[in-house]
Each structure stands twice: as C-alpha cells, then as structure tokens.
Amino acid sequence: MSKPSVFLRITSFAILLAVLWVDLQAQTTHRFTEGLIIQVPSNYGREAVYTDVLLWNYYQGKLPTPQQGQPFGGLATDEPANWMPVTADTSGFFRPQPTTGGNLNSPNNPAGPGRIERLSGKRQTAPQRRRWRPSYLYLTYSSSKTQVATLNVRGNSAVLVNGTLHMGDPYRMGWMEIPVQLKKGLNEFYVRGLLVAAELHFPEKPVYLNTEDLTLPDIVQGKDKSHLLAGVVVVNTSSKVVSGLTMGSSTQGQAAEATVPDIPPYSTRKVTVPINASKVTETGDVRSQLTLRQKGKVVDQQYLLLRSVTPTLPYRITFVSEIDGSLQYYAVNPAAGGEKPGDALFFSVHGAGVEALGQAQAYQSKDWGTLVAPTNRRPRGFNWEDWGRIDALEVLALARETLQPDTQRIYLTGHSMGGHGTWFLGATYPDKWAAIAPCAGYPTLKGYGSADGLIPEKGRNAMETLLLRSSNQSDVIAYASNYRPLGVYVLHGDADQTVPVTYARQMRAVLGEFHPDFNYYEYPNGSHWYSNESVDWKPLFDYFKWHKRKVDTAVHTIDFKTANPGISASYYWATIYQQQEPLEYSHLVLSRDINQGAIIGTTENIHTLQLDVNAFPSGKSIRIQLDSLNEISLEKPTGAPFIYLKKQESGWQAVDRPSAGEKGPHRNGTFKEAFNHRMVYVYGTHGTEAENQWAMEKAIYDAESWYYRGNGAFDIIADRDFDAPAYADRNVILIGNAKTNSAWNTLLANCPINVNPNGVQIGTKQYQGDDLGGYFVWKKPGTSIGSVGVITGTGLKGMQAATANQYFAGASGFPDYVFFKLDMLKNGPEDVVGAGFYTNQWEVGQ
C-alpha cells in the first residue's frame, strides 16, 4: 500500500479521535458563553450591614426572568439599569464592552475601579469608589433531565443557583468546585461579579477526590517522616450524607489510613490523610497514592507529589488547627548551620496572594536565627485579623515549642498585607516581640480596604456606629502607643503604587509623637516589590539584632491599650479583665515598685483588673492606688499569684476572681468569637419544608465560604442528631429559631434573646414580623470558654436576609447581637432593628 494511503488512514483515525474527544468534552463539560449583565447596587464589606437590591427583589419574588433590554425596577437612582447581552471571549471570560457594561479601564465606569482594585490591590480614590456599582451576570442552562453537576465559576463573589446561594471564587483560584442539583428544564444562575468565567462539569462518580487544592507537608530528611499529614478535598455530588469513608495513602510501600468525617449531600470537604514517608531517603519529588474507600470498597484513587528536601532548605510543616480541627501549614527557613535552641526567631507574615513557603524562600538564611512564616489560613485569608490572627498565634506557639528560641529575641516582620499584619499583631500583642518591621504595609483597613473593602470611618446612623465599634481592634492607630516598648523599623519603596508610601509616612508621623526608638527608610525608586530586599533588607535585620525584649521580671512600667479583652487583654503582669463600655478602647498605665510594695496608675474604661503580684515578696502588704482614688492595702494571696480589683462608684476595691460565667478574656463575646473551638453546625429540621431547606443550604454556604477563605472545614449535623455531651468541649453554631431547631432550648435556655415565628425578643424589647433575621452569641452551658453562635430568622424572609452576610471577612465588625429586616438588603442600616453588647454578666443592657 502506498504511503499516501497510510497517511490518509492515520489522518482519518486522528480526526475520529478528535471528534470523539470533542464529543466526550461535550458530555462532561458545559462552558457558559452567553448571558445577560446588569449593574445594580450592592455593598458587601467589613461590617454587619450589607445591601443587595437584586437579592432583595429575588427573595421578595419581585424579580422577573431577565430579558435583553428589560429594565430593572425598584432602584432609587436616576441611572438606567437594563439587562444587556454579553458574550464570553475565547478564554471563557465575560468581558463587558462599553455598550454592554462599560469600559473596565475607564475611571468613569462604575464597574471598573472596584474590580481593578481587587485585581491589583491598588487603592482607589473616594470619587472612583462612589462610581463603582457591582454587577450581576445572568446565565442559564437547559437540562434534558434532573442531574448533578459541579459548578466552577472564577472571578465571582457569589452565585445564586436556582435560588440557592453559593460561595464564589473572587481571586480566580480555579479549584472551587460546587456540587449543584440541576432540574429538568431551565436552570438559572445569578453570578455576582464581573470578569467571570463559568463552567458546569458532569462528574462520572458520585463521590471523588479533587487534588487541585492540596495542603501538603514536606519530607525533611533527618526529621520525623512517618507521621506526616496532608489535606485533600472530597467531593460529594450525591443527594445523601456520605459516611463510613476512610482515606489511605501509600508512599514507597508504607501505608497509612484514617477515617473521614461525614460529608453532607452536594458539598465538599477538605479532609486529612496520614502519610508514612519513613522509607524516603532521597530528595526530590515523591509520589504518594491516595485511596478513598467506603466501607472497605474503593471509591476513588488519585496521587499527589510531595517534596523531599534537606533540612537546610525552606520546608513546610502541617498541623491540626484548634480553630476547627482542619489541617493548616506553615513554612520554616532554617538558620544557616541548622536550627539551634536559643537562636533568634524571625516571624514573617506574607502579603495577599503569597504562599507561606514563598514568603520563607524570599529570605537568605541567617546564622543567628530561624525564620517561620505562618499562613493566615489562605494566601489572602483574613488580613492577619480574626482567624488569621489566631493562626499566627497557633504557629508562634508551635515554633516556640519545637525550635526553643531565645524568647527575648523574637522578631515580627511582613510585607504588604503582611505589613498590615505586622502593624496589627505588633500593637495587639506588644509583649511577644523584641522588635517589628512592617514592609510596604498599610496600618488599618479604614484607610486601605483590599478585596473586601474598607471599614467605614463612621456609621450612617447611631445603630451602624454601634456596629462598627466591633471593628475597633483593627484600628491600630488608635492604640499605637502599644508600640512604645518595641523597636520599630519601617521599610517602604518610595515609588510603590500598590500601597503608596503615604501610609509609611503616616505611621512615621504617628510614631514621631511618642516613640523613642524607631527607624524609617524609603527605598529609592522602590516599587511594591523591587527584589527580595523588599523584605530581606540587611539594615532591617541589623536593627533586629540590636534589640532584645525585656525579661518579664524586669518590666515595671505598663502602658497598654485594647478594644477587646477577648482578643488582647494582657501585657506582662497586668490584665484588663472586664470593660465598662464593651469594645470601646481601654487604657491602662501602671508603675510598680517591688521594694516599696506599691502599684500606682491610671485607667480608662476598665471595670475589672487582674494583677499578677508573684514578684512581690510574701508576708508584706501591697499598696495600690488607681486613678488618684482610694488606696488599697492587701497581702499577697497564698497559693495564687493574682489579685482582682473592681471599680465601684466610690473607688477601687479588691474582689474575688470573677465567675467564669461572666465575661472575661476567656470568653468576651461578639458573634464571631463562636467560630472557634472546633465548632459544629447544627441546622434545624422542625420548620416548614422551605425553612428546613434554607437551614441546610445555609450551613453548606458557610462551609463553602469557610473553606474558600480559611482553608477550613467543620462538621454539619441535623438538630435531631445533636447530642450535647458528645460536643461538650466544642462551640456550636445553631441555624434556625426556637421552633425550627430542637437544640435551641438545650443550648439557649437562659439566654435573654429568643426568636420564634412571631418575632424577636431582646431582653424586654419585642420586635414583630416574619422578615426579621439576625445573629447573636451566647455562652455555652457547662463550659467556661465555649460559645453558641446563632444564625436565625423569624420566618423564611428573615432567614434569607441572614444568608449572605460577611462575618468571614477579615476585621468585619459584629457585636454580641444584631437583628434586621429583609429590607436592610435594600435600605441599609435604617432597617437594623436592634444590636448591642451584653453586660459583663451576660445581660441585655437597658
């Protein structure tokens, strides 16, 4: 046979393969290419108030099926808003043009500056912010049958799928696969965001592994390799809770296995798999086989690649977080010559979008200390506040335990968002560091908002102002005097267009008012990142070397501020135990004289004070005078180092330690405090079908949000399966109200807040209506530290109003309780009906 004939047969076969491949892709993937877009007001930010006019219309049943050119009604604006067609480009992204949504590069386009800022991190001016209006993209899919798919949308903040809200992928990470139930016929997708790409995938298996988003340890030669832990996502696209799963690994013939928590229907969960790499002796990539089993039967198999490195290179360590029991990691850059007890510890917090390993690799090893880089739970995470702050503290504790550094030589530094983290962690915990060095950082989220926006400077009414008090701890400028005992080195490029040098100059002016020892350097022509010297700057580390933290017994003067004792209460031997006005700033100035047996000082907004008097000799009285009031004389207590003082109208007096049932550093309230201590979600099943469905969907929406923002996971169970003793040491998040959730009376029996289908009771106040939603926290019975967080509504409309809030945004302010009408989504703070803080005795203030 001639060669041309062979060529034709080969070519025909290739064409057939191509056709089969295209056909296979058509069966397993649907890419959205056409849609309608509209710009309508919405505001999701760092506070309890949010607005979303489209969502409000949808929940009210007032949103007609979008049609091209159809106006969007109900807007309090003269600007027209019509549904306009938009088409995806060859990369799959919808990029609106001037005729269908505006030129994204134009400062006059309401959609442009906000989105550009999210992508670049560059702060926009106030006029540009006012021009920006978010967009919704309407997509449809006609299904020939009822079936399951996974939805992948990149560039969105959320998506409403046939009425169910799901988390988005605002940073376009690409691995956010959301199982959804498609109905036969028209399926509707309202995508909140701009510059998005969307696909449906039709999985072959109901339960499978997704290895696109892994949490991995490194195999470090010379260290323990037999008990490593990795994190991998399990996807459940079935309509049933999947239980009885185990996850195993095999690494060079060494097997390890662990049980997997139950996974609710149509959801994903990142789980922990043990790895035994004890047989790995060479460096390089190492393959580990993963096997997911259900009751012994193989469900899915995948593999992952691990790095095997020498102990001289930067490496990753995974650990189980006490926040939620999920797997997290941090990175270590060992000291030159190896890690040694008694060395310095450099604690480096990364910028937005930067992995902890990349942060550690940006530094050359130092011969006098080891560098540790925590993760903030995600490369963007929580701006090093909230759970990012707790992650940093967890890693610091682990580093101190494993590395045994010189505790007087622990230094804090970070870049960009990590520069903010340095300002924040430095002011919040000034007794943990010898010196700090923010690089290219912004001090507060009032001045630089990043993706979740700004913390407003003030509220639009008295109620919103009260809500914003919950964010006071974020404003480090208000308690910048905490930097006084620390060495501070400020490094910033003078040509930085992402975080302008004006932020560094602002802090130079603040420090110049009081600080006796700070250094400031503007790198000439330095952009936001001009080289590794953006963080690894020799004069900065020389400055560190000159500073040591005082030993505890050498600190005799205290000047300390905090807004929330639940976040930061103590400085050396003094603790602000309770406040007079919750979450307003408290200020403590003390001086002690051990030889004279005296403590004198002043206080602001302090109700109860704890003093450690262990340094005073036994058998002698201690004289204490605060605020130029009465003098107290007492003896050092036997068997306990602490004394407690309470401020009365007539002056200060010594008291017994407050009951653990009162507020204090162990449990000080605010709704967000409940998302800790391995919280478990308990959703109600005793309402109407729609209310029960909402409760389950809300739990899954929060699980998606927590996973995306915090690389985390939590258990989700029905109220009928809740057994209080089984979760005695864990926080609980209740979803529902007193009628719909049967665990309500068990956990909230003595709570002064009650919610039922008729309305909300807050102390003696009553609010009526089926459209009231809200959040509140309560002290969990039977424990001194546990909390119950409640996500609630009086009826379906109220429950829907509570769905989309942003309590997982870093530094967003939520008080102990807040309630609002569904109309808040349209009108903002004027429809917040009640909010506030409990007293120190957990009573509703009058």
Image: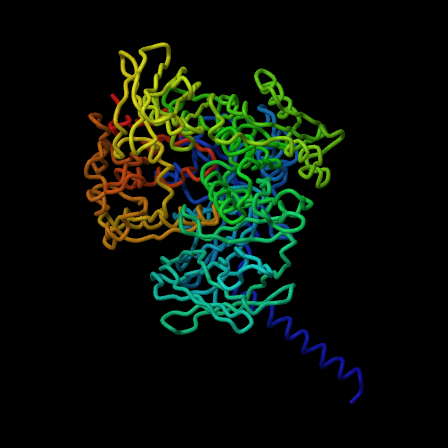
Q: How is the image coloured?
A: rainbow
The answer to whether residue 151 is above or below residue 352 is: below
Quadrant into which the C terminus falls: top left
Quadrant into which the N terminus falls: bottom right
Left or right: 37, with 690 as reference point: right
Residue at 27%, 37% (x, y): give it.
779
Residue at 60%, 66% (x, y): give it.
286
Residue 153 appears anywhere in the view: yes
Image-quadrant location for residue 817: top left
Q: Nearer the viewer, residue 262 or 131?
A: 262
Residue 131 appears anywhere in the view: no
The residue most toward the bottom is: 1
Q: Nearer the viewer, residue 516 or 500?
A: 516
Pinpoint residue 786: horizontal percent, then vertical percent: 31, 41
Pinpoint residue 660: horizontal percent, then vertical percent: 27, 34
Image-quadrant location for residue 469: top left
Q: How many marks?
A: 0
Residue at 48%, 65% (x, y): give it.
203
Pinpoint residue 514: horizontal percent, then vertical percent: 57, 17
The residue most toward the front is: 619
Pinpoint residue 598: horizontal percent, then vertical percent: 39, 17
The residue most toward the top is: 628
Image-quadrant location for residue 489: top right
Residue at 54%, 67% (x, y): give it.
278
Q: Nearer the viewer, residue 150 or 503?
A: 503
Q: Nearer the viewer, residue 764 or 607?
A: 607
